[in-house]
Image (cartoon, rainbow, N blue to C red):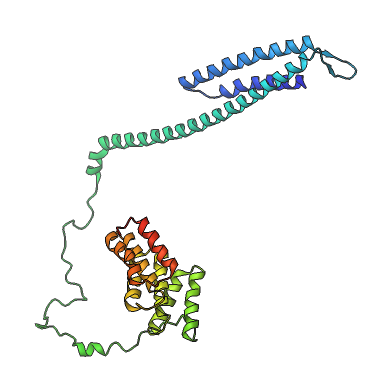
Amino acid sequence: MMFKIIKFLNVGLIIIPIIFFSKALTEEEEIYLKSISDQIQVITKDLKTLEKAVYQKSDISSATGSIKKSDGLNEDILTKHLLKLNEIEDQFRELTNKYEEVNFKLDKLSSRLTKIQSDNQLRFSDLEAGDTTSFTKKENQKTLPGTSKPQDFGASPGYQMSNLPKEQSITSVESAQTVITEQPEKKESLLPDKPAREQYEFAVSFMKIGDYETAEFALKEFIEKNKEHDLAGSAQYWYGETFRIRQLYSDAATAYLDGYQNYPKSKKAPDNLLKLGITMVQLGEKDQGCKMISGLKKEYPKASKSVLQKAQYEQKKFKCKS
């Protein structure tokens, strides 16, 4: 096994100089390769020392081909040199990767230089041709029939330039009203043809599945059709939530304000006021929003415990003055 490893390293030492001297390199790369060559020479010396140590301290049996150990020294030496060989293999891989990276950069640079060179040649050729032949081209140009002066081609046949009427007739508004005869198409209803409570549950179900845009239109339709229903205030609250979740805070604030003003006795009235205050703070109106959050307990003392606790938490969060 030791002879195979030595043979592999010898082949690697032969291949490395051939790869690195295959292209013309710059002065910095030659210095870099010189340092690599010095490292390879050091590795070669280590290999020769390894060969001497192996031949001196190991007895090779001709019958079995096994290696006898002498006082445990031979095994330690082999272990150390195997570790050394692993380090050499890692260095070899690293050098190969660096070599490929340098080749890639050189190819890219050479392509850029070639392109720049071709562009410069074209520009120089254009300049030379312009200096020597610009006057001859003007002299050799033939005058084409016609003239370069602007011509009057007359008025367009689609317009009448003479005998125009002094007054222009204007269509009256009454005659214009007769033009519009079609009625605008009515949009299909999203809500099912069922009682109001089932319509409300249907509209809110879109919130549960995360379809906030459809929930927006369904809740709006429910509010328009059931303004006097007990669930209208709750629908108005969820209508505002469709905007807040999508971070449309201005629309959300308008929806919460409508719910607070139009449905002050609704179960969701305290929620509308709380969310209105939070949204106002998010819109930059901190003072006004904090007043709404702080005044929730006074205006709705019988609100649910969770809403009151939420109001206290938001008041501390926004550092509102009590």
Q: Is residue 123 left or right of residue 306?
A: left
Q: Is residue 187 left or right of residue 32?
A: left
Residue at x 35%, y 68% (from the top left corner): 297
Q: Quadrant of the N terminus?
A: top right
Res 111 quadrant in image? top left
| Residue 298 vertical placement versus 191 (above, below) | above
Q: Is residue 33 left or right of residue 313?
A: right
Res 145 quadrant in image? bottom left
Looking at the image, can residue 11 be seen? no
Residue at x 56%, y 19% (from the top left corner): 36
Looking at the image, can residue 265 be seen? yes
Res 41 quadrant in image? top right
| Residue 291 vertical placement versus 105 (above, below) | below
Query: In the depicted view, which residue is nearer to us: 189 or 33?
Result: 189
Residue lying furthest left: 166
What is the x, y in percent for residue 313? Answer: 40, 59
What is the x, y in percent for residue 54? Answer: 76, 13
Residue at x 31%, y 37% (from the top left corner): 126
What is the x, y in percent for residue 312? Answer: 38, 61
